[in-house]
Amino acid sequence: MPLRNVINVLLLTADPDLAELYRHECPECVVTIAKDAAALSRKAGKHRFDALIIESRKDWMNEVKAVADTLGPPPVMTLVGSAAFLRRSSESVKALSNGHAVPRGTTKLPQELGFDEYVAVKLRDFVHRMKLGDGSHLHSLLVQTVEKPLILLVLEETRGNQIQAAALLGLNRNTLRKKIKDLKISVTK
């Protein structure tokens, strides 16, 4: 089992639920919460943080600059986004505390990954969660999860033309029709 690191997280938010989520999801993290950069200067002093998480506002760039002025060198991880985005991102912070260090400057954003890299990242997380939850029948579950959105996208791209969609998918037209029926996909031209 990897060695767990205690990491210091600075969370700038006015949302108490978001703060509680990070405290709950990352028990190895020391979470310092401030409403904004001005409140931080009264709280943090010259403390070193491993992760900076900012709930975005109109002036979030000024917020980041003010934090940098207060804290000095930037932390290993900086997340800026809406409360919904930050809720989904708690896994990234949790990975830091589980010993999976994120090297500065080498982490790619999802839009920078190639399709195969992006799928591999998502599959690794999916398989890991299934393993932790004693999951089984992973292959069929994954195929079912991917198949419906794929068929929907292809049908949308072909404007509901099932012959073109079947050709694009590499399926027989009758096989596609059966899958559309089984997956309860409504087709409109």
Image: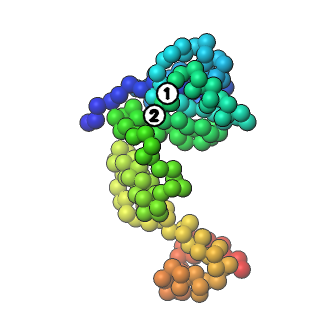
Report the residue at 59% width, 74% height from top: 154
Q: Identify whether 112 is placed above or below 158.
A: above
Mark 1 lies on a secondary structure that is: loop
Q: Amino acid at mark 1?
A: Pro
Query: Would residue 15 be found to the left or right of residue 132 on screen?
Result: right
Residue 132, position as x, y percentages in the image: 35, 44
Q: Nearer the viewer, residue 82 or 67?
A: 67
Give the CA distance from mark 2 to mark 1.
Answer: 9 Å
Q: What residue would you read off at disc 2? A: 76
* Residue 15 seen anywhere in this rendered image of the structure: no
Mark sitting on residue 73: 1
Q: Nearer the viewer, mark 2 or mark 1?
A: 1
* Residue 164 seen anywhere in this rendered image of the structure: yes
Q: Identify whether 9 is placed above or below 94.
A: above
Could you tell me which quadrant the N terminus lies in? top left
Q: Residues within 10 Å of mark 1 (few under 14, many from 20)?
A: few
Mark 2 lies on a secondary structure that is: loop
Residue 78, position as x, y percentages in the image: 53, 35
Report the residue at 71% width, 80% height from top: 189
